[in-house]
Amino acid sequence: MMRAGGEGGPRTRRNVDLFGAGNKKGQREQATDPNAPKKDRIEFDNINIKLKFKEKEEVKSTWTGLFKKLKILAPFLWPKNSAILQARVLVCFILLGLGRAVNLYIPIYNKKIVDSLTETPTSPIEFRWDWILVYVGLKFLQGGGGGGGMGFLNNLRSFLWINVQQYTTKEVQVQLFRHLHSLSLRWHLNRKTGEVLRIMDRGTESINSLLQLILFSLVPTIIDLLIAIIYFFTVFDYKFGIIVSVTMILYTIFTISINEWRSKFRRRMNLADNETRARSVDSLLNFETVKYYGAEEYEVDAYKTAILKYQVEEWKTTITMNMMSSAQNLIANSGLLAGSLLCAYYVVNTNEYNVGDYVLFATYIVQLYGPLNMFGMQYRQIQNNFVDMENMFDLLRQEQEVVDAKDAQKLLPKGGGIEFNNVNFNYTPEKTILKNVSFSVPPGKTVALVGPSGSGKSTIIKLLFRFYDVDSGSIVIDGYNIKNQVTQESLRAIIGVVPQDTVLFNQTIKYNIQYGRITAEDAEIIEAAKGADIHDRIVTFPQAYDTVVGERGLRLSGGEKQRVAIARTLLKAPTVILLDEATSALDTHTERNIQESLNKMCVNRTSVVVAHRLSTIIGADEILVLKDGEIVERGRHADLVLKQDGIYAGMWKQQLESNKLTIEEIPLDDSAIQKAPPNQPKEFDVARNDDGLK
C-alpha cells in the first residue's frame, strides 16, 4: 500500500538542502533528540518535500505590486460611513505626533537634570525639581523601551484604535466572503475548503497586524530616526550625525535585502500550512469513507507527513530569522560603540562637551536602539503579512465567470415556460458536452431527461440555474434570455432545485426548511413539511423541529434528508422545479414514497427532471433521451418503449430485467398512467430500510 504522503515502499535516507543552495554546509540531518522514541522522532533528512513552488515565486519580491495591493485595501482602511470612527483615526495620528516630540525631549531634560547636579566653575549644583517633574511626566507619556512600551499615549491610542481595527476586519472578511459566494461553480469544484479557510484566516489577521505595524510602529520609528539624525547634525558635531546615519542606512539595507531573500521560505511555509489544513479538513469531511475502508492510520500518517513538511519550512524560516537578528544586533551596537567612544573622547579632551552631553547622547541612542531593534522585527512582520495576504489577494482577484449584463432586469415569471435554442456548451475546449440541444417545456408541464452517464443531463440543469453560461445558442424562460436579459438573483428566485445528494446545514431541521424562504413563519414551515410528508416523522424526534441534523445532515437518513429538501423547495414556492436524480440514491421503497411528494410539488409547475430510474418519469409530458450531448430520441413513455431498437426502449428493458419486472405489469397507456400516481410499478423490491435519525 502507498505510504502516507504519496510515497510507496520503504523510505530511503537522503539529505535535504535546507536553504536550496546545494551546499552541504547548509544541510541538516536530524533536528530532534536522538534518544527520543523512533516513532515520534522528526528526521528532516527523511522527509521528501513535494511542495509545489513556481520558479518565479522563488525570486518574487514581497513588495511587487505594492500599490496594487494597497489599492485593494484602501476602501477598507478609512471608515467612510462613520464620522465617529474617522475622528478616532485623526486623534490617533495626533497622539502619534505627540509621541515623537516626547521622545526628543526626554533625552534633553535628562541632560538638563545631569547638568544641574554637576558642579562646574561657572554653575553650582542646583535642585531643579521642576525639570525632574517634566522628565517623569514625559516618561509617563512615553512608557518603557524608548516609546515602544505601553505608555499613556500608546495606551490611549490603542484604546481609540480598537473600533477602527474591528471596522477594517469586518469589511475585509465580509467582502471576501461575498466575493467567494460570487465565484463560479467551476471555481468552487476545484477549491479545497480547508485551504481557502486558512487563507481567509491568515489574510484577515495579517491586515490588522499590517496596519498596526505600518501606522504605529514602522512610520514612528522612521520619523524618530530622521529627527535624531537632524538633531545630531545641528546640535552636536556633524560626526555624530554621520555615525547615526551610516548605522541606520547599513541596518536598513541589510534588513531589507536579507528579508527579501527570506521571503521564499515564508511562502513555502504558507503552502505547507495550506496543505496541512486542507488535508485535515478533507479527511474529517470524509469521516465515513475513512471508516468504511479502515484507513484511520493511513489518514493519520498522511496528516503527520503534512505536518513534518510544514515543520521543515518553519525551521528554515525561524533559523534564518535568528541569523538575521544576530547580524542586525552587531550593526546597531557597532554604531553605539563608535558614537559613545567619540562622545566620551570629546568630554575628556574638549571644553565644548560635558557629562550631560554624554548622558544625552547615550540616552538618545539607547532610546533609539529599542525601536531600531524593533524595526528589523517590524519589517519582517510586515513582509510576512504581505506574504500571508498574497493568497488572499489572489482570491480577491478571481474573476466571476458568470456575471449579469449591465442592462439585466428582474425576471417576472408568467408561467415558467422554458426554451433551449441550439445550445452548445463545454467545460473544457477539448470536449463538447452539449451539441445543438433544442427543446421547450410549456408552462406547467414536465420534461424528463434520461440517458447514459456523461450525456449532459445534469449539465442542462446547471445551465438552467445559470451556474454556467452557454457557449452558443440561448436559454429562454418566459421570453427572457437568461444570459443577458435577467439578473441571476431574480432567475434563481423562481427556480427550486432538489439535487441527488442533498447537503444540509449543521443546524436545526427548522433552519434547514426555513432556508427556502428566510422570512417564513412557523406555520408555513410546518405546512411545507406536511407537503413533503416529513412532519409526522419530525415530531417523533425528541426536539422535533429543533433537532440539529449534524454536519451535512448526516444524522438524518437519505429519505429524511430528501424530504427536508423537498419541504425547503415547497416553502420557496418556485415557478420552475429542477429535479436532478433526486431519488437515485434511495432504496425503492423510500423512493416510491418520496416520488409521491415530488409529484405533489410539481403539480402546476414547470418541471425538468433528470432521472436514472425510468419508472419515476413514465408520466412526464415529454421524455428527452440524450447521448454524447445530443438529443437522440424524444416522446412520451408509451411511444418510446415501443421503438424496438431505440435507446430508451433498451434502457427500459434492462431496468425491467434488473428489477424482475415484466412488460405486462407496467401501464403503457396514458389513462393507466394517470390512474397510478405516483406511477410507480408495484414490482420493485425493497433493497433496505430507512433507519431514520441517527
Image: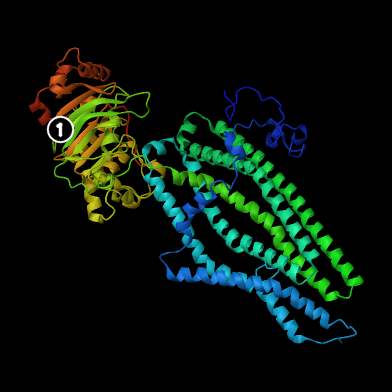
Q: Residues within 10 Å of mark 1 (few under 14, many from 20)?
A: some
Which residue lies at the image location 29% right of the left edge and 53% below the top edge? 518
The quarter of the picture where residue 23 lies is top right
Is 169 placed left or right of 217 in the picture?
Answer: left
Is 511 placed left or right of 485 in the picture?
Answer: right
Residue 26 image offset from top left, x and y in percent: 75, 36
Is 167 placed left or right of 62 in the picture?
Answer: left
Residue 474 image offset from top left, x and y in percent: 23, 34
In-front residue for pair 232/605: 232
Residue closest to the far left: 671
Pointer 1: what residue? 677
SS type, badge 1? loop
**What's the coloring here?**
rainbow
Residue 123 image offset from top left, x and y in percent: 86, 86
Q: Amino acid at mark 1?
A: Pro
Q: Is residue 288 visible?
A: yes
Which residue lies at the image location 65% right of the left edge and 56% below the top edge? 378
